[in-house]
Image: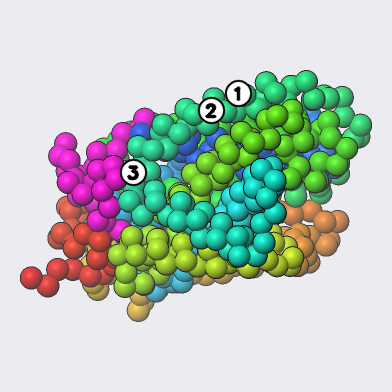
Amino acid sequence: MGQDRGYASFSVERRGIDYVPRSERPLTVRGLAGLWAGASFNLEYVVYGALVTSLGLDLAQALAVIVVGNLAWVVTGLASLQGPAAGTTAFGVGRAVFGPRPNRALAALNWLTQVGFETLGLALVVLAGLALAREAGADPGIPAKCALVAVAAGAQLCLPWFGHATLTAVLKVLGWLFAGSFVCLAVLAAPRVHLASAVHGASWQALTIAAVVVLSGGAMSWTENANDYSRYLPAGVRGKSVVGAVVLGGGVPVLLAEVLGAVVASGLHDPSSVSVVTGLPGAFPPWFTVPYLAVAICQLLAINALDLYSSGVSLQAAGAPLRRSQCVLVDTLACAALTAWAILSSSFTTVLGDFVQLIMVWLAPWAGVYLVDAALRRGHYDLGSLFSASAGIYRRRNGWSPAAVWAQLLGMGAALASTDSGPFVGPLSRLSGGADLSIYLGFGVAAGIYFLLGRSTVHDEVAKSDPGEPPPTVPGSGSVAKLPTT
């Protein structure tokens, strides 16, 4: 297998959503697992586990929801198989699923989603930095806070700006360091854990909301980005190996972190007060505050690096005429501005929290359509059409796939009708007494409708597909529709 000269650690990745030739894919399954582990051993997931307990669940219920919810990492693994088959990102493949025009709109939605997550992560980094400053006796004012936002934004820019090879190399090493820090957290928290919870259990409606927290904060929120990281795997890689790498590298660390969070929070008087910066350090010895905050900053920057990488290629897929590295810079500036607002505003964090809760309204149906399409195609894509200026056989009716668009819209309607979020409670949620079934109905309705309406078209397209590689694109051109003119 050849080596892509543009694929080297701390060398800026030239490709964006451009096709990765089969001879230039040096990633291994072990490397993919290491990349996920470096982002997934994260204190943010410890807080998600504590949040599950704060919803009124007893410890047994919380652990059951966490274990079952993290089985969805198998879905994230299945959503990683199209990268090696098609040689591009999720929203590059999306041209075959939805058609070029709707795919751009969905890529823009994902860009907004990733910027939201980036802003949340960067705000937590800044809050941790402010807490460190206070530990040193300083009292930062508004100028110092804004300066800290700028420094943190610059720090998180580095890895995604360099690109895939740098992310893989660095996160693989950080994964081991973060795993060691997780063991330290577990040992230090053990004396303060009280397994006998005073909580008598929650209703089934509360269990459904807790499941949404686990799914939307973990496996399901990565499905639309999974191929961004797997596309440098060889085309002939075994599917089971890819799924296993994602589950072991991403799912197992998240599961362990959320279990730790639930167990620690079960012994606290007010689990709802637990956060990465303010509440969680209280579960550990006082001398551990400074190293805890330092580790938290590193881990939050690591997970934000993946969000930034995916937001960059999503912005390209949405139609931005920029190189991938330029898109990362734009995203950094956007989330830095929003983070400054979040730090100085008392209302923005509430708005952002509601936004994060509602992402499943579009994302669960998208995953249902995307995965049914992948199952029907079984890795057979017409690469010439996928990377053609005219979109070839995937152009269909003026650049739209009616079956996919209808499935997406009806799935979103089902998800919205059954959601129970701060700003909105759907009619189905009201009828069920406050249950949140948005992920399951959104995914299931969209998947079912697409299977019924789209399978014959997909089968016809598979029969016409040419497995040959497309003409070479200009690395980093940022558009799958742009071919060399010379």
Q: Position of residue 459 (x, y in %)?
A: 34, 56
The label shown at residue 43 is: none
Q: Are marks 2 and 1 in contact (CB under 8 Å)?
A: yes
Q: Which residue is mark 1?
A: 183
Q: Secondary structure at mark 2?
A: helix
Q: Residue 59 location in percent, x, y?
A: 80, 31
For mark 3, does the 10 Å Cα neighbourhood hold few (<14), some (14 to 19), or many (20 or more) residues? many
Q: Position of residue 218 (x, y in %)?
A: 59, 45
Residue type indicated by callout 3: Thr
Say whether disc 3 or disc 2 marks the residue closer to the N-terminus: 3
User: Nearest the camera: 419 or 21?
Assistant: 21
Q: Please, what secondary structure does the residue beneath circle 3 have?
A: helix
Amino acid at dot 2: Ala
| Percent of width and height locating residue 397 | 36, 76
Q: Residue at x 27, y 52 (%)?
A: 12
Quadrant where the image shows the N terminus: top left
Q: Is residue 462 visible?
A: no
Q: Which residues, given as a range, are shown in magenta?
A: 1-30
Q: Is residue 127 above or below residue 251?
A: below
Spatial distance from mark 3 to mark 1, Cα to Cα?
26 Å
Q: Is residue 16 left or right of residue 125?
A: left
Three-letter code, disc 1: Val
Can you tell which quarter of the image residue 240 is in? top left
The overriding secondary structure of the stretch rendered in magenta is: loop
Residue located beneath label 2 in the image: 179
Question: Whole-Å distance between the Cαs marked 2 and 1?
Answer: 6 Å
Query: Which is nearer the eye, 302 or 415?
Result: 302
Taking depth in this image into account, of 346 and 432 the one nearest to the observer is: 346
Asked if marks 3 and 1 touch (Cβ < 8 Å), the reply is no
- How crowded is the residue under tag 1: few (<14 C-alpha within 10 Å), some, or many (20+)? few
Query: What residue do we see at 77% from left, 36% from top?
Result: 282
The circle on residue 166 is 3
